[in-house]
Image (cartoon, rainbow, N blue to C red):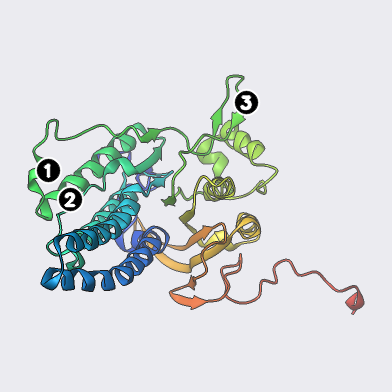
Amino acid sequence: ERSLDPAKRAQLGAHYTRREDILLIVEPVLMAPLRRTWEAIQAEAAPVREKYDDALRSGTRATITHVGNELLALRERMLADLRGVTVLDPACGSGNFLYVALQLLKDLEKEVINHPLWLDLPLAFPEVHPRQLYGIEVNPIAHDLASIVVWIGYLQWLDNNGFQHLLKREPILEPLDNIRQMDAILGFDADGSPVEPEWPSVDVIVSNPPFLGGNKMRGELGDEYVGAIRRLYGDRLPGQSDLVTYWFERSRTMISQRQVRRVGLLATKTIQHTVNREVLNRIKATGDIFMAWSDREWVLDGAAVRIAMIGFDDGTETSRVLDGTRVTHISSELKATIDISKALQLEENSGI
């Protein structure tokens, strides 16, 4: 991280996103559905385990094998979910979100493998792997750093959890081709026309895209770049939208195309303001917001920034949590009250 340009570290998300903040996104967006599945499988497996214990005491070998295979099938169903889930950070910086996501997935995998439900049955081994993690990063040094961070996290987990024998491999590090170096929101076709870059189809997107206000973008990114993205997204986002809104809109598009299931992104609190809120209105129009932290302090280089965290999907999720409290509705203003942002004046009240 110290090898990065100090002026660019924050924009790249290097070091600055605290684990506590990452967990507020990764837990509800990535882990909550997996934990619900795990709870359901435990409930389904409990009576089967009782049958298996009864068979061990007085059943035939055929009965023991049959019931044991039922248990193993339930375990495999859960492990298959864990080993099949894919995660993308389209502004991955030095890989902090991917690192935390991998640790949580492997912790849950270990919990499943070691659960007493499978006692005396053939052992399973951890297979959740960095290949399930995808990243996009424009900076070449940060891109390489992210790949190394994810691999070190993987090796650390194996070493810390008693699987040192799996570390006996050469080479100890492998390249992660699924962390790509590219611009996440702007590309160009063969004719030089701006296009939306292709993102990999995954189950979950979690990220802390760069903070840059709409009125500062030209000074930081240049007229040509800003003009290109304004034209590319102009029929969907207002011209003065903050930079982070383009990650929101790109993620919303992926959900609408059924290429992504759930998204959790971090933004500044200005995401709730009139111009930026249009992207949240679009999210509400094609899906829904199921999780939000509307106003949190986030310290950056000693300066306090107010941030928002937002989780959204196609409307499938039925549980909604706002600022840590269960609610029935989250508006595009990130409030649990009725959304009046689009209310129209009654003709009967004209002139009053």
Q: Which amino acid does label 1 sit on?
A: Leu
Q: Which of 202 and 139 is in front in this view?
A: 202
- Tell which tag, 1 or 3, sits nearer the viewer: 1
Of pointers 2 and 1, the one earlier in the residue sequence? 2
Residue that label 3 marks: 193
Residue 62 in percent (x, y) is at: 18, 59
Query: Circle 1 sits on which residue?
Result: 166
What amino acid does circle 2 point to?
Answer: Phe
Q: Identify the mark nearer the N-term, 1 or 3.
A: 1
**Residue ID at (31%, 49%):** 83
Q: How many labels does the image show?
A: 3
The answer to whether residue 83 of the structure is visible from this angle is yes
Tell me residue 33's x, y (percent): 40, 62
Cα gap from disc 2 to disc 1, whole angstroms: 10 Å
Residue on which disc 2 sits: 125
Q: What residue type is labelled 3?
A: Ser
Residue 12 sits above or below residue 190 on the image:
below
Distance between mark 1 and mark 3 Cα atoms: 48 Å
Pointer 2 or 3: first along the chain: 2
